[in-house]
Image (cartoon, helix red, strand yellow):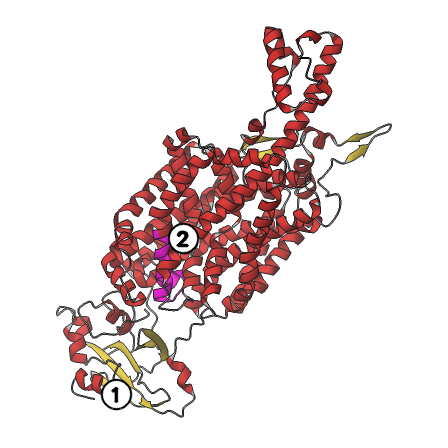
C-alpha cells in the first residue's frame, strides 16, 4: 500500500484514500472499540475491457427527466382537498380574509418543512425508514409511523376514488340519473319518492342510490356491491400504475397531473358565462376581516397548509430519493407549494362560480314560490292590493322588485307578518350555507351541473378530474409505503405492490358496507391528524437538534453546490417547531372538546342528524391513533436497550466515488491481526473503486460504529474534521 494519501491523490487524480492512521487519528482516543477495529481496503485495478463498468454508478433508478419529477410532486400535493376542503375553509373563515393567514403559514411552515423532506430524500436516497435510521437510529420509528399512516389514509382515500369511478360511469346518460326524483306507485296514485321530496334529487341519489346508507355506524347492512366493484377498479388502477415503481407511474404522471388543470380551466371559463356566477366570485373575494382575529381561522389555515403538502406521509421523501443528487431542491421546495396554492385558488374560483350559479337558480325558484303565495294572499284579501306599487307585476317579478314588495308587506303587516311565512330569498343566504368535503363534490356540485347545458359532458369531465386528482395523490401514498419497505428488506417491488394493494382492498371492504361512509369519516378524523403532526414535529427535531441544523446546512451546501438561504436555518431551528407544537396542542384540545360522533342519515326525516360513536367505535378510533404512533417509542426503546441483536455475517461494504455509494458483498474472512488488507481485482472503470468497512477484531460479527450506524462508511460521513474526505450518499 502507498505510504501516504498524497501519493494516492497524485496517482488517482480525483480519488481520495485516507490511510488507516489518518482515519484513526480523527477518532476519539477513548474509543477503544474502534481502536481494535480492522480497516479493509479493497483496491481494484483498471481494466477498460471489462463490461461491468455500470457497477460504478448509483444503481438507484431515477426519473427520466426533471419535469416528470416535478409533476409527480405536484400531483402528490395537489389532491381532492384542493377542490373541496380549501374552498370550504375559505367560505367558512371570511372569504378573501382566509387567504392571508394561509399564505403566511405556507411561508413559515409549509415551504420549510417541504424543503426539509425533499432535501433528506435527495441527500440520503432512501425511503422514509432508511432516512430516519440514518439521521438517528433511535428515531427510526418515524419512518415506520409514516408508512403506517400512509396505509391508513390509503384505505379510505381510494374509497373516495371508487365513489368518483361510480359517478363517472353513471354520467354517460341523459338526463343524468340524479337530475330528478324517482316516482313510486301505490294502489291508486303515482307519487314522488318521499325521501327525495323532503331533501333534494342529488342528496337522495347520493345517500340512497349510490351509498344505500344505513341509519347508523352500528348497522352494517352488508356490502354495497356497486361500490365494491368501483373500489376494485380503483385499486386495480393504482396497482397497474405503481407495479414498476416510478418506471410505470412516470408514464402516467403527465395525464394524471396535468389533466385536472385543463378541466379546471374549462370549468372556470364555462362557469363565468353562467348567470349568477359573479355572486359567488364576489362572495369569495369579499373579506370578513374580523375573522382574521379569530384563533380558529389560523389553526385551520395551519392544518390545511400541513395537509395540502402531504408532509409526514413519506411520499415526498420517496419521490425525491429518485431525483438527481445535484437537483436544485431548494427551488422545487418553493415551486411545488406555490403551484399548490394557486391551484387551490383556481379550484376555489371554479367552486364559488358554480355555487353562485346554483344559489341564483335556487333564489329564482324561491322568489317564484313566494310570488305565488303573495298572489294567493292578494286574492284572499290577507294583503291589500293598494300597498303593491303599480309598476310591479307579481307574475313577472324580479329579485329587486320582490325585495321591495317584501319590505312593504313586512312594514304594513307588522306582528301578523310571520304568519304569512314569506322568505326574503337572498343569494347571499344560499352562499353562506357551509358545504364541505363529500357534500360539496357529490351533492352541491352535481346539483349545479344538472342545470348546465350538456350536463353529462360536464359531469364526465368533473368526475374524471376527481379520479386523476385522487390517483396522483395515491401514487405518493403507495410510494411512501413501498419505497421504504423495498429499501429496507430488499424484496421485489412488484410483489410488495401487489400484496399492498390486495391487502388494502380487502381491508377497504369495511368502507363499502352500507355503513361504510361513517367509517370513512372516522378514519379521516382520527387516522392522520395527530399522528402526522407528531411525525413532522419529530422530523423537525431530529434534523435541527439531533443531527444538527448547522451540519444539515453544510450537507445541503455540498449537495447543491451552493449555500441554501439562511432563512431556512432559523425557521427549522426556532419558528417552525413552535408553530407545530402550538398546532398540536390546539388540535388535541379541539379533538378532546369536540364530541366524538358523526352525521348519520335519517331516512324518515330525509336529513342528517348527529350521533355519538358507540364504545366499540371509540376503541377503534383510539387504536388507530395508538397503532400509528407505536413505532416511534417502540424503536426508541429497542435501540436504547439493545433488545434486538444486530445482524451478523456479510454486510455491504461502502465505496466512495464523488459522493456516490456503491454496495457490494464482501468477505469477512481474513487475518484479524492485520489492520489493513489490500485485495486486487480486475475492474472496468478508469477510476479505482475502494471498499471500506470495519470489523471487530477477533470476531466475525460486524459491530456498529460509535455513531450507531453500520460500517466505516457511515462513520466517515459523520467526521467533521476531515477536509479531504469525499462525501457519501449515506
Q: Residues within 10 Å of mark 2 (few under 14, many from 20)?
A: many
CB-based contact (under 8 Å), mark 1 and mark 2:
no
Horizontal placement of 533 versus 426: left or right? Answer: left
Q: Nearer the viewer, residue 591 or 45?
A: 45
Which residue is rendered at x = 30% and y = 58% of the image?
Answer: 138
Quote the CA–CA distance across marks 1 and 2.
44 Å
Q: Main secondary structure of the magenta part?
A: helix
In the rendered image, the quadrant that contains the N terminus is bottom left
Q: Nearer the viewer, residue 691 or 109?
A: 109
Per the image, label 2 sits on a secondary structure element best described as loop
Looking at the image, residue 89 lies above or below residue 507? above
Residue position for label 1: 678
Which residue is rendered at x = 40% and y = 42% of the image?
Answer: 102
Quadrant in the picture for residue 187: top right
Q: Residues within 10 Å of mark 1 (few under 14, many from 20)?
A: few
Per the image, label 1 sits on a secondary structure element best described as strand
Give whichever of discs 1 and 2 has the lower sequence position.
2
Q: Which is more foreground, mark 1 or mark 2?
A: 2
Residue position for label 2: 312
Does the magenta segment cover residue 119?
yes
Looking at the image, residue 561 lies above or below residue 581? below
Q: Nearer the viewer, residue 538 or 708?
A: 538
Q: Position of residue 523 (x, y in %)?
A: 51, 45
Amino acid at each position: 500500500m502507498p505510504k501516504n494519501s498524497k501519493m494516492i491523490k497524485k496517482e488517482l487524480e480525483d480519488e481520495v484514500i485516507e490511510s488507516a492512521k489518518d482515519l484513526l487519528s480523527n477518532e476519539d482516543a477513548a474509543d477503544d472499540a474502534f481502536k481494535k477495529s480492522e480497516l479493509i481496503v479493497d483496491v481494484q485495478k483498471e481494466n477498460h475491457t471489462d463490461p461491468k463498468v455500470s457497477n460504478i454508478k448509483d444503481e438507484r433508478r431515477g426519473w427520466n427527466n426533471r419535469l416528470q419529477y416535478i409533476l409527480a410532486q405536484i400531483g402528490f400535493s395537489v389532491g381532492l382537498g384542493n377542490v373541496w376542503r380549501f374552498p370550504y375553509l375559505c367560505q367558512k373563515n371570511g372569504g378573501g380574509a382566509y387567504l392571508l393567514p394561509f399564505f403566511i403559514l405556507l411561508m413559515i411552515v409549509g415551504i420549510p418543512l417541504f424543503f426539509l423532506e425533499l432535501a433528506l430524500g435527495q441527500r440520503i436516497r432512501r425511503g422514509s425508514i432508511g432516512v430516519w435510521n440514518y439521521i438517528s437510529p433511535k428515531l427510526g420509528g418515524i419512518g415506520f409511523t409514516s408508512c403506517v399512516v400512509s396505509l391508513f389514509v390509503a384505505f379510505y382515500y381510494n374509497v373516495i376514488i371508487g365513489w368518483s369511478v361510480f359517478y363517472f360511469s353513471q354520467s354517460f346518460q341523459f338526463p343524468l340519473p340524479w337530475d330528478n326524483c324517482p316516482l313510486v306507485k301505490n294502489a291508486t296514485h303515482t307519487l314522488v319518492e318521499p325521501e327525495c321530496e323532503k331533501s333534494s334529487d342529488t342528496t337522495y341519489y347520493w345517500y340512497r342510490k349510490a351509498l344505500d346508507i344505513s341509519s347508523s355506524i352500528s348497522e352494517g347492512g352488508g356490502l354495497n356491491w356497486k361500490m365494491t366493484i368501483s373500489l376494485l377498479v380503483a385499486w386495480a388502477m393504482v396497482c397497474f400504475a405503481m407495479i414498476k415503481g416510478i418506471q410505470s407511474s412516470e408514464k402516467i404522471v403527465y395525464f394524471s397531473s396535468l389533466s385536472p388543470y385543463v378541466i379546471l380551466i374549462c370549468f372556470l371559463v364555462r362557469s363565468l358565462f353562467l348567470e349568477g356566477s359573479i355572486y359567488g366570485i364576489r362572495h369569495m373575494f369579499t373579506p370578513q376581516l374580523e375573522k382574521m382575529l379569530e384563533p380558529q381561522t389560523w389553526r385551520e389555515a395551519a392544518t390545511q397548509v400541513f395537509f395540502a403538502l402531504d408532509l409526514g406521509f413519506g411520499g415526498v421523501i420517496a419521490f425525491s430519493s429518485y431525483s438527481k443528487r445535484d437537483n436544485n431542491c431548494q427551488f422545487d421546495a418553493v415551486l411545488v407549494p406555490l403551484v399548490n396554492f394557486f391551484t387551490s385558488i383556481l379550484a376555489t374560483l371554479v367552486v364559488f362560480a358554480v355555487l353562485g350559479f346554483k344559489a341564483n337558480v335556487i333564489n329564482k325558484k324561491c322568489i317564484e314560490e313566494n310570488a305565488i303565495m303573495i298572489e294567493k294572499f292578494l286574492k284572499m284579501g290577507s294583503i291589500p292590493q293598494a300597498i303593491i306599487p303599480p309598476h310591479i307585476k307579481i307574475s313577472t317579478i324580479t329579485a329587486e322588485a320582490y325585495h321591495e314588495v317584501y319590505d312593504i308587506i313586512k312594514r304594513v303587516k307588522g306582528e301578523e307578518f310571520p304568519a304569512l311565512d314569506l322568505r326574503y330569498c337572498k343569494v347571499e343566504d344560499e352562499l353562506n350555507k357551509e358545504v364541505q368535503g363529500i357534500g360539496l363534490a357529490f351533492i352541491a356540485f352535481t346539483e349545479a351541473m344538472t342545470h348546465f347545458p350538456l350536463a353529462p359532458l360536464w359531469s364526465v369531465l368533473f368526475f374524471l378530474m376527481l379520479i386523476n386528482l385522487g390517483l396522483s395523490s395515491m401514487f405518493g401514498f403507495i410510494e411512501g409505503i413501498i419505497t421504504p419497505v423495498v429499501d429496507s428488506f430488499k424484496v421485489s417491488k412488484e410483489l410488495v405492490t401487489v400484496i399492498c394493494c390486495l391487502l388494502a382492498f380487502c381491508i377497504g371492504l369495511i368502507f363499502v358496507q352500507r355503513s361504510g361512509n361513517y367509517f370513512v369519516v372516522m378514519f379521516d378524523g382520527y387516522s392522520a391528524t395527530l399522528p402526522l403532526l407528531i411525525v413532522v414535529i419529530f422530523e423537525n427535531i431530529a434534523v435541527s437538534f439531533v443531527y444538527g441544523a448547522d451540519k444539515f446546512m453544510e450537507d445541503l451546501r455540498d449537495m447543491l453546490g451552493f449555500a441554501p438561504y439562511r432563512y431556512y436555518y432559523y425557521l427549522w431551528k426556532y419558528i417552525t417547531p413552535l408553530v407545530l407544537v402550538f398546532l398540536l396542542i390546539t388540535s388535541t384540545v379541539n379533538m378532546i372538546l369536540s364530541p366524538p360522533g358523526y352525521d348519520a342519515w335519517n331516512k324518515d326525516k330525509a336529513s342528517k342528524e348527529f350521533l355519538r360513536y358507540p364504545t366499540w367505535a371509540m376503541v377503534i378510533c383510539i387504536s388507530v391513533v395508538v397503532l400509528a404512533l407505536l413505532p416511534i417509542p417502540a424503536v426508541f426503546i429497542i435501540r436504547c436497550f439493545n433488545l434486538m441483536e444486530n445482524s451478523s455475517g456479510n454486510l455491504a461494504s461502502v465505496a466512495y466515488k464523488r459522493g456516490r455509494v456503491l454496495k457490494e458483498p464482501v468477505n469477512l474472512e481474513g487475518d484479524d491481526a492485520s489492520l489493513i488488507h489490500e485485495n486486487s481485482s480486475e475492474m472496468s472503470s478508469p477510476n479505482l473503486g475502494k471498499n471500506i468497512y470495519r470489523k471487530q477484531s477477533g470476531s466475525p460479527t460486524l459491530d456498529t460504529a460509535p455513531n450507531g450506524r453500520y460500517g466505516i462508511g457511515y462513520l466517515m460521513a459523520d467526521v467533521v474534521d476531515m477536509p479531504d474526505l469525499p462525501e457519501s450518499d449515506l
